[in-house]
Amino acid sequence: MQAARTGLGRGHGGQEGYSLIELLVVVLVIGVLAAIAIPTFIGQTTKASDAQAKELARTAETTAESIATEHEGKYENVSVEELKKAEPTITTTISSKQAYLSGTTHAPSEYSVTVTSATGDELTISRSAAGVISRECTSAAGKHNCSGKTTSSW
């Protein structure tokens, strides 16, 4: 009676391991999955940077309205310095890692606040003299982060 063979041998003679073709198929599958996943993760990073910038722009807008309320409804005092003074959480330091308030315009009955995101996009909230609020996103040169365009509203 012959003893039964034990072990994980795949072929005759007890040879173990994977063939070159099997290894290449595994590497190919991993490569395809990485090609799908990496752009998705990069897109999420861009969205997070722009979300941070939108939140900062909205905070600056609310602060600008508060400043106007304290000055008889006039927006003449809406400046980067005044916004930072009124709301210390507003970031004004130029950075490539986080959003910052990069500029303002102001007149007695209108203003705009512009925030630059870590991706270089500029998000602007403007109030016209008629009281209409508009939001615009402008991508940095050569980029299309604003809803796939160089400019868009948000």
Image (cartoon, rainbow, N blue to C red):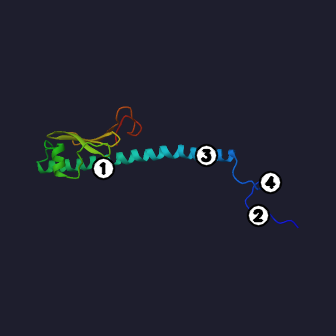
Disc 3 residue crowd, few under 14, some 14–19, many 20+, Cα 10 Å: few
Secondary structure found at label 4: helix
Number of the front mark, 3 or 4? 4
Under circle 1, the secondary element is: helix
Q: Amino acid at mark 4?
A: His
Q: Nearer the viewer, residue 124 or 33?
A: 33
Q: Are marks 2 and 4 in contact (CB under 8 Å)?
A: no
Give the alpha-carbon distance from disc 1 to disc 3, as whole Å.
Answer: 42 Å
SS at circle 2: loop
First along the sequence among labels 2 and 1: 2
Residue type highlighted by circle 2:
Thr
Q: Residues within 10 Å of mark 2 (few under 14, many from 20)?
A: few
Disc 3 designates what residue?
A: 27
Tell me the residue that label 4 is attached to: 12
Residue in the picture at 68% in, 47% down: 22
Which residue is label 2 attached to?
6
Quick check: 34 left or right of 80?
A: right
User: What amino acid does circle 1 point to?
Assistant: Glu
Task: Between residue 27 and residue 11, name the one nearer to us.
Answer: 11
Cα distance in 3D space between marks 2 and 4: 13 Å
Name of the residue lying farthest toward the left: 72
**Separation of marks 2 and 3 at Cα, in angstroms:** 30 Å
Please name the residue that numbered disc 1 is placed on: 55
What is the spatial separation of the Cα atoms under label 3 and label 4, in whole angstroms? 27 Å
